[in-house]
Amino acid sequence: MAIPPNGPKAPKSSKPLSLPQRPRPQPSEPPKPAQRPQPQPPQRPPSPQQAPRPAAPRNGTLSVRAKPVSDRAQRFFAPCPRGLEQVLADELATLGAAQVSATDGGVGFSGPFTLGYRVCLWSRIASRVLWQLAESEYRHEEEIYRLARNIDWPHLFSARETIRVQVDAIRSPLTSLEFVTLRVKDAIVDRFRAAMASRPSVNTSMPDMRIHVFLTAYKATVYLDLAGEALFKRGYRREGLLAPLRENLAAGMLALKGWTGQMPLFDPMCGSGTILTEAAMIAMHVAPGAQRAFAFEKLRNYDEAAFRQMREEAAQGVTPLAANLLFGNDRSEDAIATTRRHLQNIGGDATADLAFETELLADVKENAEHVMLVDLARNDLGRVCEYGSVTVPDLLRLEKYPQVQHLVSTVRGHLRSEVTPLRAVAECFPGGSITGAPKLRAMQIIDELEPTRRSIYCGSIAYFSSHGAMDSNILIRSLLLTGKPASPQKLYCWGGGGIVADSDHESEYQESLTKVGALLHALQP
């Protein structure tokens, strides 16, 4: 049972990934179709029978240990807006990339695995950073299935992470990319089932892990996205106007003009200030990824120490913005105000992130409140679990997200044989993080003081399978859209914080605004 985070405090701050050491095919980035001769369509053999899925082990989950990434150079591909390929290639070279090769829609490069960290943190032009896992020729879907099935996915990430598979193709002879997507997903799930009793779930909107497959006329390449959300989402845009210019495109425009922060810049139609904000980050030497999280931080052998050092070096390199350097104008007063807020965001958060992290870990009130929640969870699980089985494997672990940082703990136990997962949830719900202690009396006080029902807020979304698996959550930061598409619709947004005896009302109010702000940021196009 995971203790829901209590007390987000700061914008995001921050071992190499481990894979089995095995021979790999010589990598290559997606080729430029205009330079490739048109091959003859391959003769497709009769469609083979789909490979049967291995049965899940019945004796529990196997322990999976991450294995170190090979010391040899890894191969990466960084997509970018078309027309900016050479600009991105020059940028990657300055970041230490080798074998840099620009192609239509992106740039291939190689280097140590931690180079992927650096590119995610520092690239102003790239949209994503894709790590090449496997590559081979193919003739039909089942060969792509076998290619993906041979990748040791359980050593990359845990079954708790959600996945999304995206397939792109140029001149592929296959008739259905949707079917290829399904077979790659099957391959990942089957590989997990062969190693353990659990499997990752699919999340097409906000997945933890994004798997990309690129098909040419004869070759399939499998990538893992190290970025997660697209890299143009810097973290400073917490609200915005309609149709804002993407951040990496704005940075690319500045790079094409050769602007380095040495001369004044005037934007006569600045809108929400994307060009000016990107220019300020260049002039101040602010890393574009300084305020956000990345997917590689959830990999099994994520090198936290190495990435933390990169963040510290980036924070130390920030310089003040020179006076009379950036000027903007717009007919909308709201646009001007938004631009000012974006400039303030990069000026403060990029350098204060590590200080917020230290402050949160040392906060007596937040730590005491969190330990209380851990004790409540231990008591709840103690009523349904075997005696002596309740443990706390993680206590006060710092977990980071693009907009906030949380303290997180894990409480674990073995259910008694007569207790079903549904009963366990009923006994433990609602969680102490949204009630307080003592739980029953706190719930009575909440019922007395709150004038309206909470609806789905502080409720749960859960699933229970026929073979005993389940997962649930507590809906704290949430959005609800009501009404039919053809009729007027309403969007409800919930967020809040726990009030205890020594809470500061101003900081609690600001915490609620921070939580809601992250939700509204996710709605931006």
Image (tube, rainbow, N blue to C red):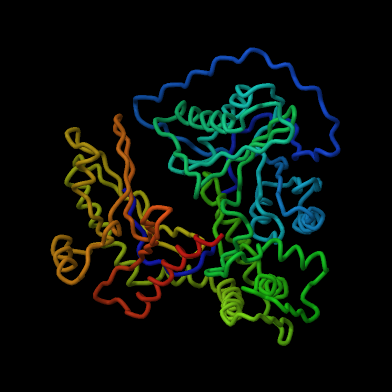
Q: Residue furthest top?
A: 46
Q: Which of 371/40 is in front? A: 40
Q: Quadrant of residue 258?
A: bottom right
Q: Which of 523/467 is in front? A: 523
Residue 126's spot in the image, x, y percent? 70, 55
Is residue 94 rendered to the left or right of residue 438? right
| Residue at the image point whose x is 44% and y is 72% from the top | 359
Q: Which of 157/518 is in front? A: 518
426 relative to 497, above or below: above
| Residue at the image point whose x is 31% and y is 48% from the top | 1
Residue 36's spot in the image, x, y percent? 84, 34
271 relative to 84, above or below: below
490 relative to 115, above or below: below
Residue 52's spot in the image, x, y percent? 49, 18
Q: Quadrant of residue 321?
A: bottom right
Q: Residue furthest front?
A: 486
| Residue at the image point whose x is 40% and y is 33% from the top | 198
| Residue at the image point whose x is 20% and y is 47% from the top | 426
